[in-house]
Amino acid sequence: MSNAIQGQLAEGVLANLLQYLSFNQASGCLTLMQDDTQGSIYFEQGNVVHIVSATEIDVAALSRLLNWTTGQFRFQSRVVPPRRTTKISVDRLLLQASYEADVSAMDSRRRLTETSVLTPASMSADAPHTVEMTLRAVQILRYLDGHNTLADIARLLKLPIDEVLKAAHELLEQRLVTLTEAPTTQQIAEVWGRALGRFEGYVEQKHPGTFRKGWVKVCNHLADDYPALDPFAPDVVYEEGELILEVEDLEPEEFTEALVLAVQHLVRLFRIEPEKLPAILGGERLAPSYLLEAAGLDTFIRRSP
């Protein structure tokens, strides 16, 4: 075979090219280029011995490169591989890369639920110039702002949640959006600080000078089961609409449970009708819905679509 082969990438071209080089027992480097991103596949006597793309190598790298449907390729013979990280037949390698892509797609489907929050992704250098999307995916994309859950979007657009989940998965597969990570204890504390600030404002308007005493009394009552609230050695300090964490190892679930109980006790202590809580804590949006849920505040605030 000739020392150099080059051409344009399209769907299916890379798989066929790998099989061709393997059949001819080629040795050298197959370089793939798309915009400013490059991938390299090294052959020795028809076997692939090293694959690299961005930060990935071998099967993971090939799985990514097989998704490229635009760009250029060039094969140069007698190029020595910088490393030998694998030695596998092309047919087996293609099967493994295909399997990994399927598993990745299944994982992304499992990760998406009604409470998932997606945010637009910054376009990477290896993103294709042309992106094909269904009309439904285009429709929901403008609502994926890092705040709305998929259930929120379904309500806003009056769509079945299954359709929204399917469209969101499509956008996730094309790397147009990313899945927001679970809220941290610090984020939950910030939401609770704002909620307690509104609660304090309501109580002080009705009974000036009483909220601080009530808060200390409730924290003291709960301290045996929730030491973080101990007013004499607090891990959590409330100051004028801000909940300050004095330690870094509080578990979000235990922290949230303690604050939910604290508010329930405050409601009883100040003889507030529970049905008034949505008005007290509502008004201007307190936080994105996924944070309200993580903080346990969605049980107190009735969100309207």
Image (cartoon, grey):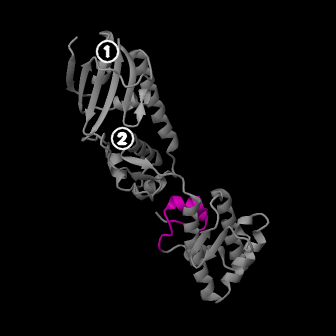
Q: Nearer the viewer, residue 232 or 188?
A: 232
**Crowding at mark 2 (Cα within 10 Å: few <14, some 14-19, many 20+):** some
Viewed as shown, does residue 184 lie left or right of 34? right
Could one spot residue 301 in this view of the protein?
A: no
Residue displayed at 42% across by 48% down: 178
* Residues at marks 1 and 2, CA–CA distance in whole angstroms: 33 Å
Q: Position of residue 68 (x, y in %)?
A: 30, 32
Identify the image quadrant of residue 207.
Answer: bottom right
Which badge, 1 or 2, is on the more N-terminal residue?
A: 1
Q: Which residues are magenta?
A: 284-303
Q: Is residue 120 above or below residue 240?
A: above
Q: Quick check: marks 1 and 2 in contact, CB under 8 Å?
A: no
- Which residue is most to the bottom? 208
From the image, tell me which residue sits under label 2.
174
Q: Is residue 280 above or below residue 121?
A: below
Q: Is residue 302 magenta?
A: yes
Q: Amino acid type of disc 2?
A: Gln
From the image, tell me which residue sits under label 1.
27
Q: Position of residue 228 (x, y in %)?
A: 71, 65
Q: Secondary structure at mark 2?
A: loop
User: Where, quadrant-wise, is the N terminus in this rendering?
Assistant: top left
Residue displayed at 60% across by 77% down: 239
